[in-house]
Each structure stands twice: as structure tokens, then as C-alpha cells.
Image (cartoon, grey):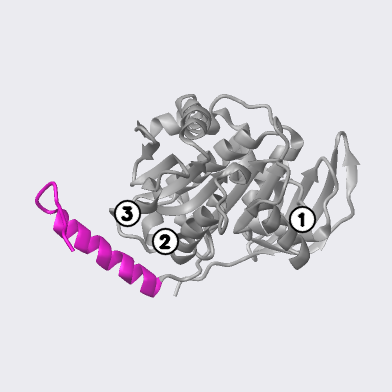
């Protein structure tokens, strides 16, 4: 094996990274990616819909259909690892790709030390990537869309992003990478979140589709680095005939992995006592199930729900009251 180094000290950096990554594999635990202490100011990042709706974070406003917002909410469900989406043309596919990748970069940038959490060496490039069907789709649509959002976002501008040919670098060796299925440059990165764009149209051979091959490369790496936290999204416009994506969706139906979409809710704390008991108000445009309310309250406020009241109409929204107890984080 032959190594080529451009400057003195590169060997030491490489060896240190190899040691840190090997150590990371040994000590890596499932972890709670939504522990506030992992983030700057000990504060959880905005959720994906808050991020999209805040011009300071995501730049110039974008008018999204309710269904696209619901899909983005579902994608960033903490328990969801892989998502397969097929949509009609003009139904918001590009927005799903752009905003998913952008939010992934935002989330990583809010972490105090993402490399440590994921067990990666400090010199590893940790990334949120989009892989499109061809270079034109990757650069002119997705990369340009991400670049425009970043240029209009005061938050991202405060990070002083560096725009390169196929990626945007953020501080801390974080990358938003946009490539195409014919290029394998992204394989050198520590990918945590990825979008496969237009999988129905990736080259199909007699034995294997390009989408299936790409999925194999990405999922193998991501499941190793972040088995409990990775997100791999396959999205495409509708096409006739049987494709790898069609087969994935049909298999999910057979396995019962199609789940009911959860409705985004707004949650306000009404009161909190010293013993950890909390009363919250939950509001939504449409009533949710009790399980959906419990899950949202736990994710957003780390409160275990004991009681959920009936929904009551208040203006154009539905409101319910929740009583619960905050989860305690114990240090050992």
C-alpha cells in the first residue's frame, strides 16, 4: 500500500484519525441524539418545520404544500431510519431533497462535537449528502437550491460557509455534498444523512439497478457509523414499470412498515414544579391520537405523559391539555 502526503504531519493526523475511529467503534453506544446537553447552549435545535418557517435559519421563505411539510416531518421522526417516497412531477420532490439536506447540515452544526458522538476522527468529513441521477440535476437543481438558501440565511452566513464545486463546507469538518450516481467522491466522507434523488431513473442492468447499488454503498457505511441515527431517503418522480423503488415500497407494505403520518403539533409549557411534574398545552390544526401527542411531548420536552385531555376547538386550531413528568438525566 502506498501513501502520498502533501505536508509534514499528515501521517500523524491520518494515524490519529484511524485510532480515534477504531476507538469510536469500540465505545460507540446507541446514545440519545436528542439530549440537549449535546448541543450548543444546551438547547435542542429547532425541529424541521420550525427550521423551515424561520427565515433566520433557512433563508428566503418557501411556500410548501401541507403534504410536503408532513413528509419532511415524518422524515425527521427520531425513530425513522429509511424513507421511500414516490411523487408526481411538480409535487415538491426538489424541495424535499433540498430542505432535508439543509436541515441535516443545520442539525450537525448545532452539535457541540458531532465527531465524538458518532465515534469519528476529528479529521473525518462528516456529511449530509444528496446523490442525484446526473450531474445536471445535482448541480443546477439541488446544489443551486441549497446554495441559494444558505446565501439568504443569516444563521448559515454567520458560520462563514465555504462553497466548493460539489459541496458547501461548514466549520468543524461538516459538509453538505451534492454528487451524482456516476461519481463516487462521497464515499470518502462520513455520511450520516443522505438523499438518493430520482432513483426510478437510475441506470438498470440485467442483474441490478443503479439505485440498488447506490443504496448498498450508502447504507452499509451509514449503518456502521450511525446505526441508530442515520437517515437514508430514496425519492423519485413516478414512472411506469417495476423499479427498485417500487419493489421497496411494495415490500414495506407487505411487511407492515407503512405507518400513519403524524401531524405536527405546537407545545407550550403552562407550569412546571420542582418535583418535575409538568402541565402543557398542545395545539394542532387537526386532532392527533393520544399516542402521537405523547410521542411529540417526549421528543420536544423530554416529558413522560400521564394524562391527555379531550381535544377542544379554539379558533382555527384544536387544543388539548397534557399532564406528565420530565425525564431526569442522571450523571454517573
Q: Does the magenta-highlighted stretch encompass residue 10?
A: yes
Given residues 246 and 268, the one toward you in this image is: 246
Tell me where the magenta segment starts and ends, as one range.
1-27
What residue would you read off at disc 1?
A: 293
Q: How many marks?
A: 3
Q: Which residue is mark 3?
A: 124
* Label number found at residue 117: 2
Q: Residue at x 47, y 32 (%)?
A: 143
Q: Earlier in the sequence, mark 3 or mark 1?
A: 3
Determine the CA span between mark 1 and mark 2. Answer: 29 Å
Decide which of tag 1 and tag 2 comes sooner along the chain.
Answer: 2
Task: From the top left corner, tell me how far across and down residue 272 is, in percent.
Answer: 67, 56
Mark 3 and mark 1: Cα distance apart in space: 38 Å
Check disc 1: other Cα within 10 Å, few if <14, some if 14-19, many if 20+. many
Q: Which quadrant is home to the C terminus?
A: bottom left
Q: Helix, strand, or loop for circle 2? A: helix
Amino acid at each position: 500500500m502506498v501513501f502520498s502526503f502533501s505536508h509534514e504531519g499528515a501521517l500523524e493526523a491520518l494515524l490519529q484519525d484511524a485510532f480515534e475511529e477504531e476507538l469510536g467503534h469500540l465505545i460507540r453506544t446507541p446514545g440519545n441524539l436528542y439530549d440537549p446537553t449535546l448541543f450548543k447552549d444546551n438547547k435542542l435545535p429547532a425541529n424541521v418545520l420550525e427550521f423551515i418557517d424561520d427565515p433566520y435559519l433557512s433563508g428566503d421563505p418557501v411556500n410548501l404544500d401541507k403534504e410536503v411539510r408532513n413528509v419532511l416531518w415524518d422524515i425527521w421522526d427520531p425513530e425513522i431510519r429509511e424513507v421511500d417516497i414516490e411523487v408526481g412531477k411538480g409535487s415538491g420532490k426538489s424541495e424535499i431533497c433540498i430542505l432535508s439536506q439543509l436541515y441535516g447540515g443545520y442539525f450537525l452544526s448545532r452539535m457541540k462535537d458531532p465527531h465524538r458522538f458518532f465515534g469519528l476522527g476529528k479529521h473525518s468529513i462528516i456529511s449530509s449528502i444528496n446523490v442525484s441521477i446526473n450531474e445536471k440535476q445535482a448541480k443546477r437543481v439541488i446544489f443551486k437550491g441549497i446554495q441559494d438558501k444558505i446565501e439568504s440565511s443569516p444563521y448559515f452566513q454567520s458560520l462563514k460557509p465555504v462553497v466548493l464545486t460539489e459541496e458547501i463546507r461548514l466549520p468543524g469538518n461538516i459538509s453538505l455534498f451534492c454528487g451524482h450516481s456516476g461519481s463516487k467522491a462521497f464515499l470518502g466522507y462520513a455520511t450520516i444523512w443522505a438523499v438518493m434523488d430520482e432513483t426510478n431513473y437510475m441506470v438498470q442492468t440485467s442483474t441490478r439497478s443503479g439505485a440498488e447499488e447506490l443504496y448498498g454503498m450508502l447504507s452499509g457505511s451509514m449503518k456502521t457509523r450511525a446505526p441508530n441515527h442515520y437517515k437514508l431517503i430514496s425519492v423519485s418522480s413516478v414512472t411506469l414499470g417495476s423499479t427498485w423503488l417500487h419493489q421497496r415500497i411494495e415490500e414495506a407494505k407487505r411487511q407492515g412498515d407503512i405507518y400513519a403520518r403524524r401531524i405536527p403539533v405546537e407545545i407550550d409549557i403552562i407550569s412546571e414544579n420542582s418535583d418535575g411534574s409538568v402541565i402543557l398545552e398542545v395545539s394542532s390544526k387537526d386532532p392527533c391520537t393520544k399516542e402521537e401527542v405523547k410521542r411529540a411531548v417526549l421528543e420536544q420536552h423530554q416529558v413522560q405523559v400521564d394524562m391527555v385531555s379531550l381535544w377542544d376547538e379554539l379558533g382555527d386550531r384544536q387544543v388539548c391539555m397534557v399532564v406528565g413528568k420530565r425525564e431526569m438525566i442522571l450523571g454517573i
